Amino acid sequence: GAVVSQHPSWVICKSGTSVKIECRSLDFQATTMFWYRQFPKQSLMLMATSNEGSKATYEQGVEKDKFLINHASLTLSTLTVTSAHPEDSSFYICSARTQGQKYTEAFFGQGTRLTVV
Amino acid sequence: GQNIDQPTEMTATEGAIVQINCTYQTSGFNGLFWYQQHAGEAPTFLSYNVLDGLEEKGRFSSFLSRSKGYSYLLLKELQMKDSASYLCAVRATTSGTYKYIFGTGTRLKVLA
């Protein structure tokens, strides 16, 4: 299968600061990347979908000015949590897929555990 | 809107067979996926169904009925390492874009 690398694996930041999370597809071109948030013992909640070179589409209730998503190339998408607060502490996971029939499933990064103190 | 339901928790014994059900109501259906997720880790792909019927992959099988909005994941010869959450995900197309929407997940405990 294809490999998606997410960095960092964990980060602790102070309240009010911004944090950037990177998601890279290592051996395929990710035409679409997805960003999810997962709270303990809950399922993945889709935050936004981004297609390379265009603006991200955010799910209802997700603040686009707080969660900035950039998908500038076919192998890299970034999520920036701006002015982070303790309630933003969560497990953030990216996934990526490519067009065509080679891979139909989306592949997931390792996830980033964000703790805001 | 999109709605995907799974049981919250299940318990089974090592060596047994367990079936995890998933029902969904979604527009633009374009496939159903099952993922396994261990605590603190990212989900890993298990299976994919887009047509009705059963897909078998070793100890894991997945079934889909599109008319009923129903799928199940069957795990045979359970092992302790199968203790994990199992996520049912529907791929839906909206305005030409794919989205993967996840169910609540089923936490499976395998007992010795």
Image: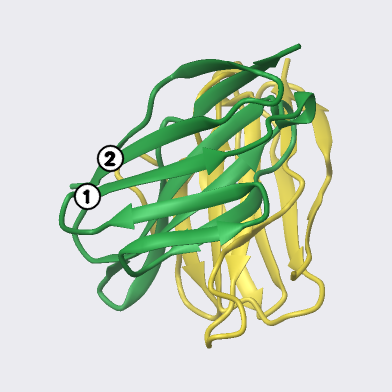
| Residue shown at the point (21%, 52%) measured from the top left | B26
Q: Is A55 placed left or right of A71 in the picture?
A: left
Question: Is B27 drawn above or below residue A116 in the view shown?
Answer: below
Q: Which chain is green?
A: B
**Residue behind mark 1:** B69
Q: Amino acid at mark 1?
A: Gly
| Residue shown at the point (62%, 25%) measured from the top left | B16
Query: Which picture quadrant has residue A31?
Result: bottom right
**Image disc number at residue B32:** none
Instruction: Kindly state the secondary structure of the residue where label 2 is placed.
Output: strand
Q: Amino acid at mark 2?
A: Thr
**Residue behind mark 2:** B23
Residue B9 x %, y %: 49, 17
Q: Which chain is yellow?
A: A
Name the one closer to the observer, B78 or A41.
B78
Name the one closer to the observer, A42 or A35.
A42
Name the one closer to the observer, B65 or A66.
B65
> Which of marks 2 and 1 precedes in the sequence?
2
Residue B79 x %, y %: 75, 29
Residues at marks 1 and 2 touching, judged by CB atoms closer than 8 Å:
yes
Q: Chain of mark 1?
A: B
Instruction: Kindly state the secondary structure of the residue where label 1 is placed.
Output: loop
Q: Is A60 placed left or right of A114 in the picture?
A: left
Question: Is B96 drawn above or below residue A18 in the view shown?
Answer: below
Residue A54 x %, y %: 47, 77
Residue under disc 1 on the same chain as residue under disc 2: yes
| Residue shown at the point (53%, 73%) measured from the top left | A104
Q: Is B74 placed left or right of A82 in the picture?
A: left
Label 2 Cα crowd, 10 Å radius (few <14 / some 14-19 / many 20+): many
Name the one closer to the observer, B92 or A1.
A1
